[in-house]
Image (cartoon, grey):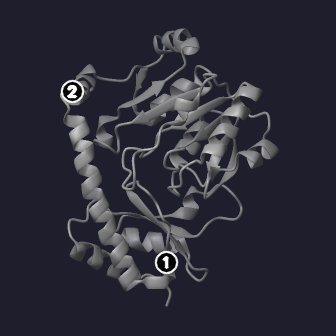
Amino acid sequence: MFITIGYRGALELLCRTVLRGGDDGWYENPGYSPGRYFLQQMGMTLTPVPVDKEGLQVAVGEQLAPNARFAVVTPSHQSPTGVALSLPRRLALLAWANQKDAWIIEDDYDSEFRYNGHPLPALKSLDHEQRVLYTGSFSKVLFPGLRLGYLVVPPSLQLAFGEAVNYWPGPGSILPQAMVAAFMQQGHFARHLRKMRQLYAVRRGYLVEALQRIIGTSLHIQPQAGGIQLLAYLDEQQCDKTVAAGAQAAGLAVKALSEWDAGTQQQNGLLMGFTNFTSAEEAHAAVKRLSALLVP
C-alpha cells in the first residue's frame, strides 16, 4: 500500500509507473469528470464506455477499444449514477484484463456509505491474476482538506512503485497520516462510519420526501443504495445545465449530470447533495427554491 496526495496523487503515481503517455483506456460514461480531465492532462487517451443499470458495459468497451491498456471503474458505487457493477460484469472485466494484459484501476468511490445491506466487496477481492490496482481516499469519509489517499498494488509491482515514489513528491506531511492511523487503530473510524451511515440515511430521506412532495413527476429519482448525493433525471423540457447553474447561484449544492458525460447523447439530470440537511424543514425549503427554477 502506498499513501498518496488524494485520489489524483494515486492516478499520478499510476501514470508514472505502469502507464505511458498515449495509452488508451476505458473510462465510465458518465464518469468522474475531474479524474477524466487529470488523466487526459497526463497524456492518456480515454475511450468513453457507457454505463447501464449493471455498471460498465464491458462488451461495448471491447468493441470500442479492445486493446486498451487500462480501465478506470467505480464498481461498488458508480460515480455518478450510483449503480453497482454486477458480478457477471466484474468477471467479464477481469477476464478482459487477464487476456489483454491490461490494468483495472478500481476507485472505491463512496463504498463506505451504503444504506441498504452490507457494503459490497471490492472488485480486488476477485482479482486472482493480480490485474487490479485499488485506490481510494479519505475525502468523503473524513474531509477533503486532508488530501490523503492510498493505492494498493499487486506484489509483482511493489518494487517498481517503491522506486517511483523515491523520485516523485511524496504524500505530504507525516502528521496527518499518523493522526488518521491512530484514529483508525483506536476504533474511532469504524464508529464514525456507523454513525454517519445512519445520519446520512435519514438526511437522504428528507430530500427524497421533499422532492416527491413538491416537484413530483418532473423528476425521476434514481434508486441508489448509498452515496452522499442523490441523482434525479429531468424530463425533456428541462435543461440540467441551466437548472444547475440557477441552483448554484441560489446557494444549492446541485450539479448537472450532463457535465459528467463525455458522449454525444448526454443524459439530463441533477446531482443533489443532502448531507447538510439537519431537518425535513431544511430540505423542503431547499427543494422549493429548486422548484422555482424548473420550467412549468
Secondary structure under badge 1?
strand
Q: Position of residue 284 (x, y in %)?
A: 28, 78
Q: Quarter of the image holding residue 18?
A: top right
State the residue lying farthest toward the bottom. 296
Which residue is at 44% across, 84% downward? 216
Q: Is residue 259 shown above or below 168?
A: below
- Badge 1 or badge 2: first in the primary sequence: 2
Between 117 and 27, which is closer to the camera in this rendering? 117
Which residue is at 24% across, 57% downward? 199
Q: Position of residue 163 (x, y in %)?
A: 51, 9
State the residue lying farthest toward the front. 117
Kindly identify which numbered label has been placed on residue 179: 2
Q: Is residue 112 left or right of residue 42?
A: left
Q: Is residue 95 left or right of residue 191?
A: right
Q: Position of residue 174 (x, y in %)?
A: 27, 20
Secondary structure under badge 2?
helix
Q: Quarter of the image holding residue 184?
A: top left
Kindly identify which numbered label has been placed on residue 219: 1
Amino acid tagged 2: Met
